[in-house]
Image: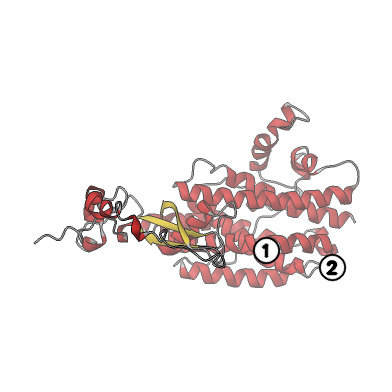
């Protein structure tokens, strides 16, 4: 049971933290249409995180709610991958991270649909359509920027260098994933094929095997998460129980 | 001789040199994406209706932008986009000769016939 709760929280935190980062673009997108596009994706991610938090609260059965799990835990209790908490960077970095995550979610949710936990497979089934759209949208932007102007290509190369060392963690099993038998090795093969195909079309070099950062899944975070949580939790910390 | 009925009149605030007819001779504006008109079909069987316009670099991006901007609240099941410069519009200054002649020809409306009771939905 502990493993299932931890894993559900990991899925919830992944989506919430990335949503919080993407939401920083709200009102600041490069053009109005893309401002709305990234915000739509953000709302989809918040929706997914709510489903996962509600399920985790149900499993915990200790008075926790989706809100207390999202807003009132401390940094070390969050189980998101480091990739999600990194600063949003420029548009290239935001796009590339969204692409890495959408490709991961796309194969993970397909896998979870067959997984022998009815609630997780139901959430995965509900989310797979929007994730397919996120993948399509972010893939096209990676190709557009990578195979675009000199400057857009340069920014994608830079984003790839920044983010690549954080992609390995998605496939390094945390203890709870091992215990639940989540087949991350199979997911990694599909993910790498997809990434390779899109990066090649974007005229970007697929990075070499390098040392991969990890820790987020078990609560060991970068310095960025604390600042993000300060923002995210401000209202509930300042006005406990505040509603609208 | 100038044919006033076939003169291009562009929709919206598009400068004339951006129109389709002269697209290959004009210098492309590198700071703005082209404007697209969006048509949404709200459900199968109905017509596509003009929903608004947006900027996009090409057709696939225009479709996706339209999806994100105009169908967030389940407004549609199908999207058409067309670059605004390809729309030819009638000239508002010619409204008199184009539309007013129809105003006093009420006999063009089928309202002067006695319909049998059995005919419904006319």
A83, A43: nearer the viewer:
A43
Occupied quadrant, residue A129? bottom right
| Nearer to us in this view, A31 or A84 | A31
Q: Is residue A65 left or right of residue A161?
A: right
Image quarter of the N terminus of chain A: bottom right
Where residue A81 sits: x, y (%)? 69, 53
Mark 2 Cα shell of 10 Å, populated few (<14), some (14-19), many (≥20): few
Q: What subunit carries mark 1? A: A
Foreground of the two, B90 or A222: B90
Crowd around label 1: few <14 · some 14–19 · many ≥20 (10 Å): some
Q: Is residue A193 visible?
A: yes
Q: Is residue A56 above or below residue A238?
A: below
The way the protein has been coloured in the rendering is secondary structure
Q: Which residue is mark 2?
A: A116
- Whichever of labels 2 and 1 marks the residue nearer the N terminus, that label is 2
On the image, the x and y values in percent for residue A194 come to 58, 70
Residue named by callout 1: A128
Q: From what the image shows, is residue A203 above or below residue A12? A: below
Residue A101 spot, x, y in % from top left: 62, 58
In the displayed structure image, the side of residue B76 where residue A230 appears, left or right: right
SS label for mark 1 = helix
How far separated are the C-alphas under marks 2 and 1? 17 Å
């Amino acid at each position: 049971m502990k493993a299932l709760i931890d894993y559900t929280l990991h899925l919830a935190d992944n989506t919430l933290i990335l949503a919080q980062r993407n939401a920083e673009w709200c009102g600041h997108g490069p053009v109005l249409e893309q401002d709305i596009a990234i915000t739509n994706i953000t709302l989809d991610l918040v929706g997914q995180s709510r489903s996962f938090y509600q399920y985790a609260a149900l499993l915990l059965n200790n008075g926790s709610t989706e809100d207390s799990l999202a807003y009132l835990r401390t940094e070390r209790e969050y189980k998101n991958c480091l990739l999600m908490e990194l600063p949003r960077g420029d548009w290239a970095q935001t796009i590339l991270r969204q692409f890495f995550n959408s490709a991961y979610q796309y194969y993970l949710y397909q896998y979870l649909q067959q997984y022998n936990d009815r609630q997780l497979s139901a959430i995965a089934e509900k989310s797979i359509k929007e994730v397919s759209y996120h993948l399509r949208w972010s893939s096209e932007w990676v190709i557009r920027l990578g195979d675009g102007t000199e400057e857009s290509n340069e920014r994608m190369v830079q984003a790839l260098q920044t983010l690549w060392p954080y992609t390995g963690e998605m496939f390094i099993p945390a203890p709870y994933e091992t215990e639940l038998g989540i087949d991350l090795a199979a997911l990694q093969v599909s993910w790498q094929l997809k990434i390779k195909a899109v990066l090649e079309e974007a005229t970007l070099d697929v990075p070499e095997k390098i040392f991969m950062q990890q820790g987020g899944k078990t609560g060991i975070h970068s310095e960025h998460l604390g600042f993000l949580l300060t923002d995210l939790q401000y209202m509930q910390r300042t006005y406990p129980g505040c509603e609208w | 001789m100038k044919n006033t009925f076939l003169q291009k009149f562009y929709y919206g605030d598009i400068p004339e040199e951006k129109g389709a007819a002269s697209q290959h001779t004009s210098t492309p504006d590198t700071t703005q994406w082209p404007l697209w008109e969006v048509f949404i079909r709200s459900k199968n069987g109905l017509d596509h209706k003009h929903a608004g316009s947006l900027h996009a670099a090409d057709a696939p991006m225009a479709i996706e932008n339209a999806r994100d901007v105009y169908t967030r609240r389940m407004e549609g099941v199908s999207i058409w986009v067309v670059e605004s410069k390809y729309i030819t519009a009638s000239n508002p200054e010619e409204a008199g000769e184009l539309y007013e002649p129809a105003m006093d020809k009420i006999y063009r409306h089928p309202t002067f016939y006695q319909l049998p009771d059995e005919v419904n939905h006319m």
